[in-house]
Amino acid sequence: MNKKRKNVLWGIVGAVACLCLGMWLGIFLYSRSPRFRGINTGKNKINAILDIIDTQYVDTVNMGDLIDRTAENLISELDPHSVLIPAESVEAVNDDLEGSFGGIGVSFSLRNDTILITGIISGGPAEKAGLRPFDRIIAINDTTFAGKGFEQAKIMRTLRGKKGTRVKLGVQRNHASKLTDFVVTRGEVPNRSVDAAYKIGRDIGYIKVRSFTRSTYNEFITAIAKEKKEGCTKFIIDLRDNAGGLLDAAVTMLNEFIPGGEMIVYVQGKAYPRQEFFADGRGTCQDAPLVVLTDEMSGSASEIFAGAIQDNDRGLIIGRRSYGKGLVQMPIPLSDGSELRLTIARYYTPSGRCIQKMYEMGKTDEYEQDLYRRYLHGEFDTADSITFDKSAAYKTRGGRTVYGGGGIMPDIFIPRDTQRITSYYNQVMTDGILYDFTLDYSDRNYKKLSSFHSYPELLGYLRQQSLLNRFVDYAEENGVRRRPTLIEVSRPLIETALEAFIVRHFFDYDGFYPVFQRDDATLQRAVQELESSAWRQKLMAHIRSIGRITIGNLRSTTASYFIYSPLPLDRNYRMKGA
């Protein structure tokens, strides 16, 4: 009996020992597994945590959404310009950097939840199909797109598509009760980045560059050739509101102005060796007097352009301090179709300054409030309110002092016009009341307004129509109280905006800018400086002192891969294209 009990006891001890040994062995082996190591150390920590959540969490989790949010949060802890673009948005975002896209060739605006065509590209698919400005698109491929609060992004995705594909549109014309069907075969639609080019005065050419895309250089060269043919020998390049784009586009444009052998820009990062870009001496405007216009919305590639001109003492920068973005993003496509735009380097102007303004990692919201803080500080109204870090001082080629660490400070500061801006003007512009009126007026008077053959003819007619009185009545009907004193103070601004937007509906930006900028103080100062013979002689003497060196590396095979991501800002009233 004792022997039997002893055997049972030893059996229990053996079983417990085996159990303990098994547990120890399991823990030992698990501790050696990649998953276990990933939780404690190494780059696999996030993957291991997600795997454990997927297999062991109490509730079922949509792992795809969780992974997307985790990735977005991870990127948000870096600099303010690194970004993860969702797969469904990649094509639309990249279209902004391309020279064209597949579409029907219209610009449109949403009015009362209805797609109102505001412009037709001449010779484009929509015009060939018979569509006209101020037609209303009610249905797309038999799906109603009116009265449902559709977002512009969705409308653009629906109207755009591969070249050669068809889209059926249900269109309301002249407020008719019955829709007319149009079948449009999508084609290649140009995505214009040079908004306007026209002659100012006797020999000055004005060029408005909205962004830097793959087609910008060709558009720019075309504009330069046109203006030279009209007798222009001096140029104003307007980069106000230009948030940037492709490095390659800025470099090739600068090559037209910078003398051979002079540096344009250089790029450098932790894992990216210094890469320098020089002018090759074959530019067509190396002797042309030049002024570049900037403001607080001029960013990235615009700042490369302005910085190269300023550091080489090649021309004058006039306007207000630029945005201050000196970080370079590279697009990295991911397997799920999304795209990571990761900051891999900083760019430096020829003097060696980086104009990136200060930021703290992970504090993007605070970074995006910088312009508002600059506004409250009075920077847009007086140059004296702007301070620079004296330790970030650099010298231009001619020995002038410039500063890094906060945008490009213009050579001539022009404050914004505050004397005629009133609360009434701000309200009708910000709320879109003024723009809506121009659409309504143009729609109601389309037959007459479309009969003019040039924008000056249309402008002459508009000035006889008492537009201001009609607009004030319209604004009051739409909830904006009539305020005679403030209206009179802002009369020149309101009348100019009314005329400019109506002109744009019929003559695009080629008509818009000459009208909208007729009282533009910054543009007027640029013209004044270019007409100054003393300034021109000084510039020409400097160019002659540089000589004509014809060596240099203008372009790099990797240049077009570097993208200066759009700033987190936008202007109102820009027409959407499809």
Image (cartoon, rainbow, N blue to C red):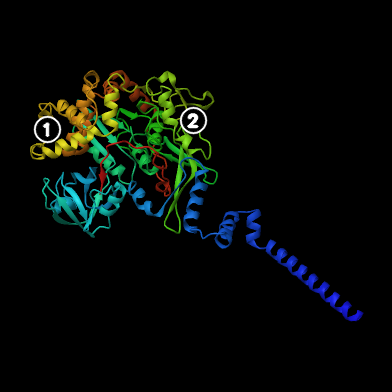
Quarter of the image for residue 313 reads top left
**Residue name at image x 27 percent, y 54 percent:** 158
**203 or 30, which lies in front?**
30
Residue extending furthest right?
2
C-alpha span from label 2 to label 1 = 47 Å
Q: For the residues carrying marks 2 and 1, which lies nearer the camera in this image?
A: 1
The residue at 10%/26% (across/down) is 464
Label 2 vs 1, first from the N-terminus: 2
Is residue 19 shown left or right of residue 66? right
Above or below, 553 against 65 in this view is above
Three-letter code for the amino acid on which mark 1 is drawn: Leu
Q: Secondary structure at mark 2?
A: loop
**Amino acid beneath label 2:** Gly
Front residue (pair 499, 260): 499
The residue carrying mark 2 is: 405
Where is residue 184 shown, x and y percent of the image? 18, 56
Pick the quarter of the image with the N terminus.
bottom right
Q: Is residue 421 left or right of residue 344?
A: left
Q: Residues within 10 Å of mark 2 (few under 14, many from 20)?
A: some
Residue behind mark 1: 458
Query: Residue shown at 12%/35% (left/top)?
Result: 454
- With respect to residue 189, does 10 lie above or below? below
- Look at the image and tell me whether residue 228 can be seen: no
Where is residue 28? Give x, y as percent: 72, 64
Label 1: element kind: helix
Image location of residue 312, percent across then percent down: 41, 30
As drawn, which residue projects farthest toward the front?
Answer: 1
- Relative depth, front residue between 492 and 407: 492
